[in-house]
Image (cartoon, rainbow, N blue to C red):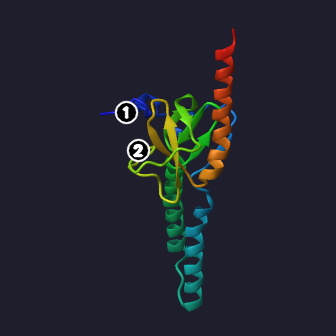
Amino acid sequence: MTDPDLPTTPERTPVEAAPVEEEVLYREPGSTWWPLLWGPLFCGAGYLIEVLTGPAHPVAWTGAAVLLVAITALWIVARRQDRSVVLTPTLLRLGTDVLHLDRIVRVEGVEEPEVARPVGRGFTIPRKTHAVPLELSGGTVVLGWARFPDDLVEVLAPLLRERDETSEQEDHQP
C-alpha cells in the first residue's frame, strides 16, 4: 500500500537531474573528497616503516594505495548520491528522492511522530543526520533529514511562508 503524499517512482530522479537553471539555496554534499588521502597516507607510512626496518616493497605499497583510492572513490560517490541534500526554489532533494515544495505544507512546529516514513530509500534517516519533520498536503508527516537540520529549516521555512503569502494574495485578487 502506498501513501499518495509520498514521492512515487516517477518522481524519483537521479542526483544529476536537478534543474541546472535553478539557484541552489541549500546544499549538503553527503561526503567530501578528502578521504581519498587516507589510503595513500597509510600506505606511505607502511612503506616508510619498511624502509627503516629492512627490505621495502614499493610496487606492493603503490598497488595497495591505488586499490584503496579506487575503493574509497566508489564509497564517496555512493555517499554523495544517497546522502546529499539540495534545496532549490521549487524542490527539495534528499538523496535520490525529490519532493516538490508545493507538496510541503509546513516545516516549522511539526512534531516528529513516533512512526514516520523517512524521505529516501532507507527505513530510517541516514546515520549522522538529524530528522526534519515535514508536513505534506494531506496531513501526512514524513521525515526529511540533514546533517545541519536547523540550517535547512532556516532556509526552507521562509520559502514556504513566501509561497503561502503569494497564494493568499492571489486568492484575494478580484
Residue nearest the viewer, comparing 56 with 91 = 91
Q: Residue furthest left?
A: 1
Assess disc 2: are there few (<14), some (14-19) or many (≥20) residues with their C-alpha within 10 Å of its C-alpha.
Answer: some
Q: Amino acid at mark 1?
A: Asp
Assess disc 1: are there few (<14), some (14-19) or many (≥20) residues with their C-alpha within 10 Å of its C-alpha.
Answer: few
Q: Amino acid at mark 2?
A: Arg
Closer to the chain start, of discs 2 and 1, is 1
Circles 2 and 1, Cβ within 8 Å, touching? The answer is yes
Q: Is residue 51 left or right of residue 11?
A: right
**Residue 52 pos. (x, y %):** 59, 89
Please say if 24 is above or below 67.
Answer: above
**Residue 122 pos. (x, y %):** 40, 48
Q: Which residue is mark 1?
A: 3
**Residue 41 pos. (x, y %):** 60, 72
Q: Residue at x 41, y 52 (%)?
A: 124
The secondary element bearing badge 2 is classed as: loop
Query: Which quarter of the rendered picture does the N terminus lie within?
Result: top left
The circle on residue 59 is none
**Residue 110 pos. (x, y %):** 53, 44
Q: Which residue is mark 2?
A: 117
The secondary element bearing badge 1 is classed as: loop
Please say if 68 is above or below 51.
Answer: above
Q: Residue at x 58, y 55 (%)?
A: 147
Q: CA distance from mark 2 to mark 1?
A: 10 Å
Q: Residue furthest bottom?
A: 53
- Tell me where residue 54 sits by quadrant: bottom right
